[in-house]
Amino acid sequence: MQTKPHWKPDIDYSSCRFIIRRLDASNQVKTAEIPVARLPMIGFIYVTSGEVLVEADGNPYLCQPGHVLIIPAQCPFSICYYHDTTGYTGGFNASALTDARALRYITAPLHQAFWFDEGVFMSELFNMLLISFEKKDLVFIEKGLDLFLSRIKSGQSPVIPDTVNRFLESVFNPDNDIKTLSSYAVQAGISENYLSRQIKQHTGRSVGAWIDIVRTIRAKKLLADSSVSIIDVAAAVGLDDQSYFARFFKRQTGMTPSEFRKVMQG
């Protein structure tokens, strides 16, 4: 059973002092399937493999292995994209802590990376928190949360720079047309080469790869609607040649557009 890294808005978490669950999600998810959430507690996502792109309080955060994202209570957030993501997600409130003073730093989404041995330690800590939650071991949960928060650096800068954040925000915005590398560079007011280097350095993917991901997500959403012709789907994602679109879609998903539509229709 896959556990997706997003929260169901119809569940009431207000009485929870602490909750944690394991993430085990693969492949890409259509944006339309992912609701915007506001938790009545401080939320967190910790990634052990794969990646997840979270929009929190209007800003994108790309979380890769060893990254944690802490989201303040009532802060709106949603998942823009994830792929082969494993890790942990959950939330807690002040009553779950022995000392709530650490929470004074969490007034906005906080994105931090743990590298090498520190990342191994954090992965084991989250695993122990999950085991303790399942066993209702409140003593370890308190100590584990205190230890987790002690590793968080107040005022830490985002892992990725504003140039990359703005690109990710633009390319994943469903109201924006899919552009070319040159168009995104003009929009950012920088050269194509500089934008390419920044995106590759800080996300591990090229501009073109991110564009292909968004194009595939949008195509899947449109193909799920049988009233939209495949040629119209191709045009909507910026590929006017239906034959090229079919080859592109199969390369990305392993299925032709027609095969994917049949699967979606059951």
Image (cartoon, helix red, strand yellow):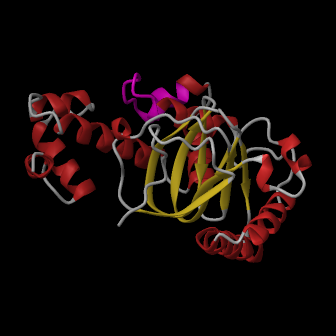
**Residue 98: image location, x then y, percent:** 87, 58
Q: Quadrant of residue 223?
A: top left
Say which residue appears at 14% left-offset and 28% top-offset: 232
Q: Nearer the viewer, residue 28 or 22?
A: 22
Establish if 118 lies above or below 160.
Answer: below
In screen coordinates, is 232 left or right of 100? left
Chain part drawn in magenta: 171-186
Judge left or right: residue 188 versus residue 209.
Answer: right
Give me the residue at 49% from left, 53% from top. 5
Q: Position of residue 39 (x, y in %)?
A: 60, 39
Residue 243 vs residue 81, the one in the foreground: 81
Name which residue lies at 57% across and 46% down.
199
Q: Is residue 182 magenta?
A: yes
Q: Residue at x 18, y 34 (%)?
A: 234
Q: Where is residue 228, by image quadrant?
A: top left
Query: In the image, is residue 98 part of the stretch drawn in magenta?
Result: no
